[in-house]
Amino acid sequence: MNKENIIKLIILISFLVLFLQGSRFRSEGKKVACSEGKCDKPHDHGQLNYHERFTVTPDDNIGMATLKGFENFWEANGTGMTFAIIIGGAGLSLLLSWKKFEQVLAFKGIKGAAVGSLFGMPLNMCANCSAVASLTMTSKSGSSETTLGIILGGALLNIIGIVTMFGLFSPAVVISRLVFSAIMILVIVPWVSKMVFKQETAPLQSQVFDKISCYFPEQSFVQTIIKSFEDWLLAVGNMAYKLIPLMLIGTLVIAIFRAFFPNELLHQITSYNSYIIIVIVAFFGTLLSVPVLFEILLGTMLYQLGFSTGAIAAVVCTVPSFGLFTLVLTKEKLGGFKVPIILTTLTFILGIGAGILAEFLTKFM
Amino acid sequence: MTKTIIGIILFLLQISLAIWFSKSIDLTITVSIAVVMFLYVIYKLLNGKYATTKA
């Protein structure tokens, strides 16, 4: 590993540490307090975030509810998505000049999915933001396995979220979530990636990338640092041009979905059979995309409404996983809508499985 | 290169919006670096340093 790659690696790690220390850990701490009912306004939690700028009321028409939902979702993911581009850009810039890193991100099969999830884990991001980071990082040559591994690792293997769930819910819920995460990452991702391999389109490449991978002025330390930051910004600009419009479309899709399916709909199914509830909740959770740790608040909401552990497990598994937003974003990388739709359907089916597993485990705990 | 410049401008707009939402120090530090590097990229662009790049 030469000098310029070490500098790029330091830039990548520095951005991640800056993000985690500057805003993410603090924000997650507040969210945990909210989930435990210890915040200042426990009755003010919104549709898509713990505390929202615009409250969507039943009097709002679809257009107004969509507009409010759009702003609330964009604001809720504002810092996360911005840092996803920043960190993803740093990763892409490193990949373009360090062959070994490129080779690691090109791993296929279970190995690729596992390595991707390990990269995703420290991001502490929801699936929406980790999708932005993942697609940026793997835009040149990363495999589908690592791309999806990063997305699901970031969303499902969030240590703070898992520890919080242990404190709030039955262990059956957490065990189901861990089993769900393992199957999604180690079985489903490698399996659906094989379908991408057959129909994969040309990777998102740009001639600007040639400017990034060129050789560095190693003799000047200052010049090397400037060049590293220049490469980072070019990578960020290149991916922002492609991803920000997609992020806007994804946000709009989610806002429309939330306008038609608000949280209040769940109040109406409390008297249904517990297995029917699991199916409904898994369907709702699969299509939904939310900011980091919001699935825990939805879980506590179901708990307070008297839903079974199965329904809670279905919601905490499906909501943070692959959803409408990630479906829109990954379309190009996964060679069309076919694979993202299959992945979404499998999330739904496994979500039901996680719910049934939690119901089963509850009988022994 | 035009698309990359548009992308950087979009990114700067997004980061400004995120700072307005959260007022966090990490974004403020990052935007300072990004703005300085953006001016450097524009300077290089105007001096024809990216002349061979078409994207």
Image: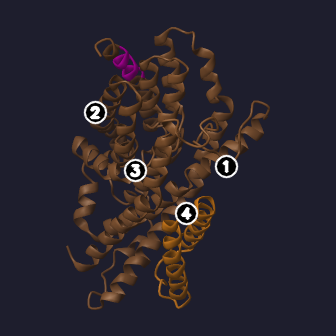
Chain colours: A brown, B orange
Marks 2 and 3, how far apart at CA: 22 Å
The residue wearing badge 4 is A241
**Host chain of mark 3:** A
Q: Which mark is drawn over residue A71?
A: 1
- Is A358 within the magenta? yes
Tag 3 or tag 4, which sits nearer the N-term? 3
* Helix, strand or loop for disc 4: helix
Tag 3 or tag 2, which sits nearer the N-term? 3
- Which region of the structure is painted magenta? A352-359
Please name which of the two marks, 1 or 2, marks the residue nearer to the observer.
1
Query: Few, some or many C-alpha atoms within 10 Å of disc 4 (few <14, some 14-19, many ≥20)?
Result: some
- Is A198 within the magenta? no
Q: Which mark is drawn over residue A124?
A: 3
The residue wearing badge 2 is A187
Left or right placement of residue B10 versus residue A359 in this view: right
**Vertical placement of residue A236 versus A29, above or below:** below
Quadrant of residue A351 in the image?
top left
**Host chain of mark 2:** A
Q: Are marks 4 and 3 on the same chain?
A: yes
**Vertical placement of residue A77 versus A98, above or below:** above
* Amino acid type for the residue under numbered disc 1: Glu
* Amino acid type for the residue under numbered disc 3: Asn
Marks 1 and 4, how far apart at CA: 21 Å
Q: Provide the major secondary structure of the magenta segment.
A: helix
Give me the residue at 53% from left, 62% from top: A240
Marks 2 and 4, how far apart at CA: 33 Å
* Helix, strand or loop for disc 3: loop
Please name which of the two marks, 4 or 3, marks the residue nearer to the observer.
3
Q: Please say if the residues under marks 1 and 2 sit with CB atoms less than 8 Å apart.
A: no
Tag 4 or tag 1, which sits nearer the N-term? 1
Give me the residue at 36% from left, 19% from top: A358
**Vertical placement of residue A48 versus A277, above or below:** below
